[in-house]
Amino acid sequence: MFKRAGTIIISAVIITFIFLSVSAQKPNDSLYSFIRLSSDIAFRISARYVDDVDAKELIYSGIKGMMNTLDPFSEFLEEVDYNKLQETTKGKYQGLGMTIMLKDEVVTVVAPMEGTPAYRMGLKAGDQIIKIDGKSTRGMSTQEASSLMRGPAGTKVTLTIKRQGVDEALEYTIERAVIELKTVPFYTTFEANGKTLGYVRLARFGEEAKNELDVAFKEIMKENIDGLIFDLRSNGGGLLSQAVNVADYFLPKGAEVTSTKGRTSDQNRTLYASDKPLIPDSVPVVILVNGMSASASEIVAGAIQDWDRGIIIGNDTFGKGLVQQVYPLSDDVALKLTTAKWYIPSGRCIQKDSRSKRHPDNMDIAEKNVDETEEKKDVFFTKGGRVVYGGGGVIPDIEVEEHKLNSLELNLERLSMFFDFSIKYTTEHPDLREDFDVTPQIIDEFKQFLKEKDFSYKSQIEKDYEKLKNTIEQANKTAEYSELLDDLKQKVEIDKQREFDESIEYLSRSIKRDILTKLYGEKAVYRQIVLKTDPCVKKAVETLTSTDAYSNILESGG
């Protein structure tokens, strides 16, 4: 007990010292008194509480309580989360190079990354990892499995694999390597309506973003492109410095990219484009965004919109206009703290008010009525005089309605039915061409597969029907309404069949997506689905190849 109490006292003293050190920058008597109070409470808990107290849990809970009074992006990062942040930022880790998930409570390969040890050794999507270095994975979480498979580059790990269509377990001894997570997973040029267009996908603003974009843009510019599609959808951001580097490709040297404003003078600064743009003004640019494009993505999209350098297509962005700074506190924990707000050249801050407050499902907050929020939005102007709004993310110049999953589609994705079907289908058709079409026959096979899997789900109408039925039963009116209930039940089943028929396009695209990923990798999905069928890409192509559509938007403020 004395040893445990001593640990708590030391922890409390350390926290006090940290806060006093920070407070020394600007004395605050009330802060000192509260720090003394927290230390006193920690001491008394350690000395007097009826049971033994875990020092780490006690102090960490106190720290998390402090963080809960701040915005949702300020966090105390424990070891796992801190390592994930560093991995995402650096874009590297040491291991085998594959994504995994739990499928039927078994650690399962989703996809090996191209060029990695897992890929070179022939691991396949759907492979079940039943042992890692002889240790059974039964009951193991993906985090535990991932931890066992990772390790210093050059060391080896043995995986025991169960593969569909193969009776005996397979054993692979694989040498770990440094795995580089691509910030630019795909880029290409393609022909559309008699013009050559470039397409570049940026997944995040990590340390390697500029280096990888250098390669992508230089390769694309060799083709004398007539327009560029730069895809920032679902890019949650990253390093502020990389956002400025990316804006450099499009904006003239000396153009303002963003400015930051905080409580202290060192947080107030303006950042400018520093190089001659690699993409000349003669090349029209379309930026694709959606509701998950955040932070650094919004800086780039917003700056390009404010300078009238390109047009934005897609959906309103996330609305994260806050700057975080990471303060390492030891080898395995850190403080990620919001220190400033950022503004784009027109002067607008795109921070959504709802993003400034903690919420259990902050990424899915339903915004207020559009008409109501627009009344409160401040009006700003682009370089050419176009009206843009602050306080609500970057609003696209052309909005493309985003497909919302219905109950059928949601449950098929949630239960990995497309993934499972792709494993079965590619086992039976290993030589399928990359440009294959999802025929009615494949759809019929998918239907049969769902029956074999006993797939079932409840549509929204079916849920409503069951509520009505329960209400009638509780009122003891079942006999009186039995005929109506039978009639409604039949109509519910008809509606579910109609829901399937209405989802054919989504089903076909999803089946193709997972089959292509398994046989040809992620790049094939971009080539065969994104470039050919994606609604936002199609709208971008239409805009870039139209005689007047692009220029009419940029000149609308004049």
Image (cartoon, rainbow, N blue to C red):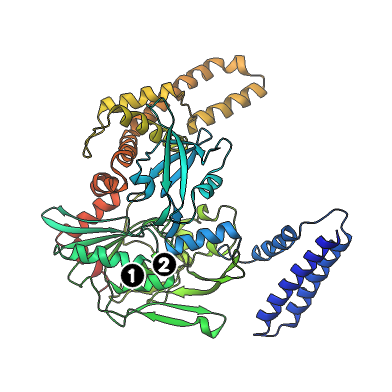
Residue shown at the point (13%, 64%) measured from the top left:
224
Measured as percent of width and height from the top left, residue 79 is found at 59, 59
Report the front residue among 318 and 556: 318
For label 1, the residue is 246
Residue lying farthest to the left in this orientation:
194
Please state the horizontal and vertical placement of residue 116, each as a whole percent of the image: 36, 50
Whether the residues at callouts 2 and 1 have beta carbons within 8 Å, the answer is yes
As displayed, is residue 202 above or below residue 326?
above
- Where residue 286 appears, as percent x and y from the top left, is 26, 62
The amino acid type of the residue labelled 1 equals: Val
**Identity of the amino acid at label 2?**
Ala
* Residue positioned 27% across, 68% down in the render: 214
Q: What element carries label 1?
A: helix
**Which sits earlier in the primary sequence, circle 2 or circle 1?**
1
Labelled disc at residue 296: 2
Mark 2, other Cα within 10 Å: few <14 / some 14–19 / many ≥20: many
How packed mark 1 is, by other alpha carbons closer than 10 Å (few <14, some 14-19, many 20 or more), is: many
- Quarter placement of the C terminus: bottom left
Instruction: Name the image quarter holding residue 34.
Output: bottom right
Would residue 433 be visible to someone looking at this image? Answer: yes
44 or 324: nearer the eye?
A: 44
- SS of the residue at dot 2? helix
Residue 541: give x, y in percent of width and height: 21, 55
Query: What residue is drawn where x is 62% and y is 26%?
Result: 471
Disc 2 to disc 1, C-alpha distance: 9 Å
What is the count of numbered marks? Answer: 2
Q: Which of 46 and 93 is in front in this view?
A: 93
Q: Relative to 485, does residue 313 appear above or below in the rendering?
A: below
Relative vertical location of residue 437 with respect to residue 549 in this rendering, above or below? above
**Where is 212 relative to 186, above or below?**
below
Q: In this view, does 197 lie to the left or right of 395?
A: left
Q: Which residue is drawn at 59% across and 56% down?
A: 359
